[in-house]
């Protein structure tokens, strides 16, 4: 598997070479200067390096935090915005990263988040499974939660949202709204060639990039073209099709055993302990702590309680298993779990995870294994605070 990560600083259409660290697929690395980026590879200090030979090109380690206001598209893109309106089922966005006002069709959009990001995401996934029966307007409540009503969204202005509920027109103040899920026939997204992260926290699943003198033109997999300010690009990650994320797979087996036995009809209680996909148990992004004790968010991953066993079929072309293992930052002071990762009968890694030590980064060869098993057990405190996060857990070629 070859991963290309290009981390860029603030610049204007690459007018001058940028200092970068080049990491090659063979494990070697060097500091050099970046001159050209395109789909086939990069040019550094007058030398051309093909994409298949690259592992990473980095200017600085950076992990932009997830924005509080953004629109999520059908291809998985997340576009942060400073201003949004809607008319005739078209969204108009402005942001620090965009070079101009951008129009998005409602058919390419999935969820528009205005406030209460974590509560909205949790409600959307758990109550509606990401597939609403109509437009959903999420309203903020006095206790900090959100409630959703279904109907038709007609327009969004800077002050209000025009919404029809049971055929009755409403003018809802923007300050009362948390999010809007847009219903309708969705377009088919193309396969992304790369993922672009901007300095405002946007993540763009792009099918192509075109670097120009004044701006960057990006065609999203959702078939929308964006123009970005060159100085807004934080990183570009290629070879996405060579990664298979566990959160995108259905496990062959998923079993959670609670500390106290529950009857089969305790559906809500049993569901509370099941693994979470791409969000934690509060609906927030999967996060682990860095070496300095600061939360680092991961675009994808799993949240798993202790006494859980997950078994996955290894994709045919997969060569390695990679993940960042750490406790939920919220339970770092009380959580402690044991973890064993097995490929068929071979133990890839086994040990304890707590909140007082840095997260564990796995990059393990799979050999000819056909299954991968994750076993999360009790640590020193039974199940207290035992919420393991597996950041960007994936199979790679």
Image (cartoon, grey):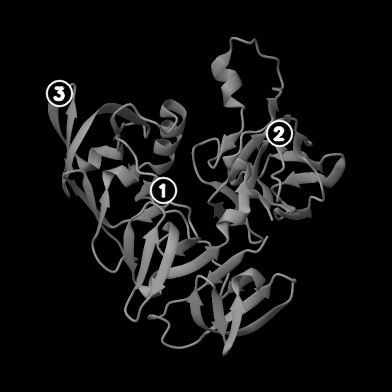
Identify residue for label 3: 167
Which is more foreground, mark 1 or mark 3?
A: 1
Identify residue for label 1: 189
Kindly identify the residue that appears in the image at 56 percent across and 48 percent down. Answer: 300
Indicate left or right for 44 with 374 as reference: left
Identify residue for label 2: 310
Q: Is residue 58 above or below residue 374?
A: below
Counting other residues with Cα less than 10 Å from the Cα at mark 2, is it few (<14), some (14-19), or many (20 or more)?
some
Counting other residues with Cα less than 10 Å from the Cα at mark 3, is it few (<14), some (14-19), or many (20 or more)?
few
Q: Secondary structure at mark 2?
A: strand
Q: Secondary structure at mark 3?
A: loop
Q: From mark 1 to mark 3, how far is it between C-alphas? A: 32 Å
Disc nearer the start of the sequence (3/2): 3
Indicate left or right for 58 with 67 as reference: right
Kindly identify the residue that appears in the image at 50 percent across and 60 percent down. Answer: 193
Spot occupied by residue 15 in the image (x, y as percentages of width and height): 41, 87
Disc nearer the start of the sequence (1/3): 3
Residue 215, can we see it? yes
């Amino acid at each position: 598997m070859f991963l290309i990560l290009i981390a860029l600083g603030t610049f204007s259409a690459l007018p001058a070479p940028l200092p970068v660290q080049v990491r090659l697929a063979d494990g070697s690395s060097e500091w050099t200067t970046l001159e050209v980026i395109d789909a086939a590879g990069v040019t550094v200090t007058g030398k051309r390096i093909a994409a298949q030979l690259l592992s990473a090109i980095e200017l600085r380690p950076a992990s932009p935090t997830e924005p509080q206001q953004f629109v999520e598209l059908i291809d998985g893109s997340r576009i942060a915005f400073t201003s949004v309106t809607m008319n005739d089922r078209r969204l108009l966005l402005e942001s620090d990263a965009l070079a101009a006002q951008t129009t998005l069709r409602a058919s390419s959009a999935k969820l528009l988040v205005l406030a209460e990001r974590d509560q909205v995401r949790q409600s959307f996934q758990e109550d509606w499974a990401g597939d609403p029966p109509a437009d959903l307007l999420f309203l903020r409540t006095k206790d900090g939660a959100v409630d959703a009503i279904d109907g038709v969204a007609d327009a969004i202005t800077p002050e209000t949202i025009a919404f029809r509920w049971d055929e009755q027109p409403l003018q809802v103040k923007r300050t009362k709204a948390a999010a809007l899920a847009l219903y309708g026939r969705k377009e088919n997204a193309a396969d992304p060639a790369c993922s672009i992260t901007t300095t405002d926290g946007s993540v763009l699943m792009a099918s192509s990039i075109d670097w120009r003198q004044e701006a960057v033109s990006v065609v999203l997999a959702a078939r929308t073209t964006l123009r970005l300010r060159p100085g807004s690009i934080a990183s570009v990650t290629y070879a996405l099709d060579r990664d298979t994320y566990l959160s995108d797979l259905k496990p062959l087996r998923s079993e959670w055993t609670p500390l106290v036995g529950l009857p089969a009809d305790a559906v809500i209680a049993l569901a509370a302990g099941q693994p979470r996909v791409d969000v934690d148990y509060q609906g927030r992004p999967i996060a682990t702590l860095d070496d300095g004790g600061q939360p680092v968010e991961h675009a994808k991953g799993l949240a798993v309680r202790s006494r859980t066993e997950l078994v996955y079929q290894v994709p045919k072309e997969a060569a390695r298993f990679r993940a960042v293992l750490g406790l939920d930052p919220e339970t770092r002071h009380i959580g402690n779990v044991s973890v064993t990762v097995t490929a068929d009968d071979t133990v890839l890694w086994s040990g304890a995870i707590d909140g007082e030590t840095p997260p564990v980064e796995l990059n393990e060869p799979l050999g000819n294994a056909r299954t991968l098993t994750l076993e999360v057990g009790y640590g020193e405190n039974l199940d207290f605070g035992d919420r393991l996060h597996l950041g960007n857990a994936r199979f790679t070629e």
